[in-house]
Amino acid sequence: MKTKHLLGLVSALALLAGATAAQAAEVTVAEFTSLDNEYWSNFDKGARQAAEALGLEYRVLTNGGDAAKQISNYEAQITAGSKMFFGNAQDVGNVKQMAEKVKAAGGTYVGIWDALPWFHPIDNGADNLAYATFFAPNGEDNAYIIAKALFEKMGKKGNLVHITGYPGSSAEISRTLGVDKALKEYPDIKLVARQPGNWNQIDSRRVMEDLIVAHPEINGVFGQNDSVGVGAMQALEDAGMTDIPVVGLDGNAETMDLIKEGRFFATMSFTPAWQAGYSLVRAYDVSKGWKPSPCERMMYMGAALITADNVESYTKFLEGDKLPFDWKKMSRTLHPDDWDPQNYVWPIDAADMWRTAEKPAGYELPKEYTAEFDAGCVDKLRAEYDSHYKAKIPE
């Protein structure tokens, strides 16, 4: 009987020790749409490996496209004691709510992709860093780069079809601005159709099928993301139109294979695994006391134009279970002198990014930010980050 009680006591103590260790581990939470999506699956892979490298407990939550569920996910994790959060917003209106909730809990939030227009991270409270940083690729610039590559492939002339995403989303607006900017530089490229494909392959394929009937002569297709582009490509192939260049943005594995096969012309890859790990590291650094400057609170992340010329080297770089990034080396607290972002990162001009959105009456960007911006922080910080970028992603 004594032995039985002793074994029970040992087991109880072991469970208590395990629970204490689990409680002691700092928790970082990634929240996004779905793990069924290839982009977010790769994002999750990078986040997991970065969390492991930093000794953090990693939790991933998905919302299935439900903006209300995203808020409840945050509330549940805050109640459970989580302090570090990063991910996109299912609706831009959620950004302010999530930032305020994390602030009230004394935590850190890093936003990715989706920003609420005219809500700067400093607006969440000038005296705190709860909304630590907003990160995103430069949608307008990336769309402009790949649109120009497409137009060159078209011989600088011909009829263009542009299949977009969801009307009104931030990525939708910025990428369309980039396409329009490129069109102004190529007067012999004629935009014959622009219709939404809702960011998915099925809807985009149907749209392209209808456009083939309406516009028998098509010389190039711009897909607002890779899924849109692949749907359009499939419709073209079904119609026997196999020599029309198609582009997209995201850099999905399927797209890379299609580029290798010569069926898809180009994509812009945002390297989601790197995005996730870098965002997690930023949340970690801020939670450890590192303070980004006002101009570092909104930052662009680099992307790579992928064509047949570089697809082999790019995919080889990312192949395998272990990603080729030194997550600790990204940290400003773990490597204060020799930190390496391992990609291009530079400050966002907030007024320019939000120029198409109506500014609330009486709103002005935070004076802390505008003072640094007017003093030339964009060029200064771009040079600083570029000088630390040593471990290169193939371009």
Image (spheres, rainbow, N blue to C red):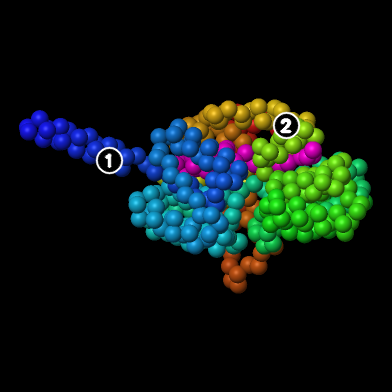
Residue 133, x across and y down, in percent: 53, 49
Decide if residue 321 is on the left or right side of residue 185: left
Quarter of the picture containing the N terminus is: top left
Label 1 SS: helix
Quarter of the picture containing the C terminus is: top right
Assess disc 1: are there few (<14), some (14-19) or many (≥20) residues with their C-alpha within 10 Å of its C-alpha: few
Instruction: Please give the name of the residue rendered at 75% of the width and 52% of the height, measured from the top-left corner.
Output: 205
* Rendered view: 223 above or below 214: above
- Mark 1 and mark 2: span between their CA atoms? 46 Å
Q: Is residue 264 magenta?
A: yes
- Image mark for residue 311: 2
Label 2 SS: helix
Instruction: Please give the name of the residue rendered at 54% of the width and 29% of the height, measured from the top-left corner.
Output: 321
Residue with the mark numbered 1? 19
* Rendered view: 360 above or below 273: below
**Residue type at numbered disc 1:** Ala
